[in-house]
Image (cartoon, rainbow, N blue to C red):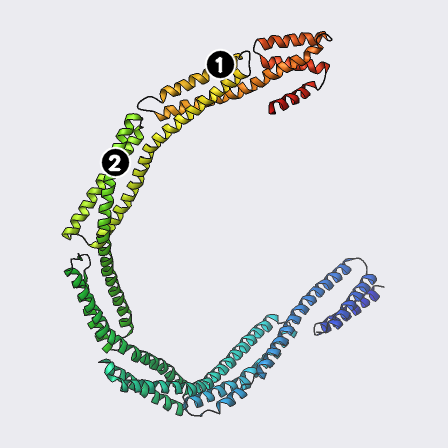
Amino acid sequence: MGQKLSFTWYHKNYEITSIIKKLLYIRNSTIVTYIHIKILYLVMTICWNTTRGLIMEVVIGLIVILLVLFGAGYMIRRNIYKEVDRLEALKIEIMNRSIVDELSKVKDLKMTGQAEELFERWRKEWDEIITAQLPEVEELLFDAEDYADKYRFNKSKKVLEHIEKTLKHVDESIEIIISEINELITSEEKNTIEIEDVKSNVKKAKKTLLAHSHTFGKAHAKLDAKLGEIYEALKQFDTETEAGNYLAAREILILQSKEILNLLAKIDDIPKLLSECQTVIPNQLAELAEGYQEMLDNGFHLKHIQLGAELEKMTKQLQAYVELLSETETAEVKENIEEIQESIDTFYDLLEKEVLAHHYVQSATNKIDQQLADLLMQRKETQEEAELVKQSYHISDIDLDRQRKLEKQMNSLHKQFSLISTNLQTDQLAYSIMKEELEELEKQIDNVKIEHQEFKEMLQALRKEERGARQALAEAKKQLLDSSRNIQKSNVPGLPESLAQLLHEAKESIAKVSIKIEEIPLDMLAVNMLLEDAVQNIAIFSKQSEEMIEQVYLAEKVIQYGNKFRRRNRNVAEQLKEAEYHFRKYEYSESLEIAAAALEQVEPGSLTRLQAILDEETKS
């Protein structure tokens, strides 16, 4: 039994080993899956036919280890094979990028000089790629697979990295070759087109220099020499082109294209700049100096405008600019001429400002003189009016301070104007400065006028306020008198104590106002306060007196109407008796309330009907 078991284990172990060896060389996933199943089947068979002892555990452990190693190796090899396939595809793609067609374009050029040298270099580089570098890559790809098959994974990865670097270098080399070919071809094409424009500009420059040589001054020689340099450079361009040196010719053409454009710009600018420096600006400076002197002769104070030194400075600058133009240096001259022109404009503005200021000073002086005279006259009138008002009215300390402040301001304005007039007569200040001072003085005069007018209106308001107070007092007296007459007409037996007190207070407040309003000087603030109290007291008295009259009338009617119920209803009789008692004591409100309550007991709604009848009688 033991020998049979040993034979069975050896037989199965040998079969597993054979299958694993085969599996390590297989890349097909379907076959691998099948082998996995086969191995699992054998393992189960072994486990079934062996005992559960030590031998079974060892066998299972070995099998698990083998499976793990196999799985890891399989995954690594599969990744390597994928990378090999990718690099193989990249190699084929590079091989298909043949630059033979690109090189054939170069043959259309003159195959001499630089063109021939470049063509030979590109052809050799391409031959090197085809005959050496790409075949080497092919061999390395086989080596990478071989290393993977032998489980030399690190070696295989290094080979693949080297292959990728090689292919990348080859691809970059091809890109450079194609770029250089395109540059050579486009250089020849651009040269053919652009040389015509450059030659046309050269002819234009030469024609201008010949036709207008006198307008360039000393710069003509420099410009002509520069044109000669460009002409010689273009000859060199033709030589390089004939020799097949298209790139060198391209560099010459680009440089000379810029040079001729720069030269044309100078040819255009120099006559204008020379005219500015030698004629236009000097004439402007002369006119400016003449106008400046004329203004001085006419009495203008112009010391603050340092024109003489600036004119001398600008004249020297113009001479220096002419020298720069003789060296064909135009950029600096153009910039500085603009600055000189701005300076000239500034001086003209300053002189014009003085002329305008002179006109203003001449007209404003008479105007301000008259304004101050009028203001001083008004001040005198206001002073007289204030003295009269003081005799009759009480003027507050604040208003008196306002008057004193106004007088000081008027005196100050007069002194300022006198000083300006003195400076104007002695020519001590520029008109622009005096203009600013006069403008400020006018503002101050306007402010003083406003304050003075407000003070005058305050004085007038005191008198107007007095008239208003007297009228209000008269109206209050009339209202009190009317209310008293209404009470008398109504035959009211007497006044309630509260209403009598109101009447007394109203008469007393009227008396206080009447006394206060006759005082000299008149204190309108106190008068207005007393008048306000009087008006309020009279208004309250008038309202309550009207209410009292209505209550008296209604109470009488209710009591009279209720008398017919006295004999029938003892309770009503007692209530009416009480109402009459309050009526005789002038307590009309309580009397009406009690009588109305008694009447409502015996005849509900009678009070409302009675009130309506009385309202109709009142209206009629």
Query: Which of the image's four quarters has the N terminus?
Result: bottom right
Provide residue 350's location: percent of width, then percent of height: 24, 59
Front-most of residues 582 and 559: 559
Q: Quadrant of residue 151?
A: bottom right
Residue occupying the point 48% across, 86% down: 122
Front-most of residues 201 and 382: 382
Provide residue 337's location: percent of width, then percent of height: 26, 70
Which residue is denoted by mark 2 in the rendering? Answer: 381
Mark 2 element type:
helix
Q: Farthest residue toward the right?
A: 1
Mark 2 touches mark 1? (CB < 8 Å): no
Residue occupying the point 54% across, 88% down: 101
Q: Distance between the residues labelled 2 and 1?
A: 50 Å
Front-most of residues 356 and 28: 356
Identity of the amino acid at label 2?
A: Glu
Which residue is denoted by mark 1 in the rendering? Answer: 501
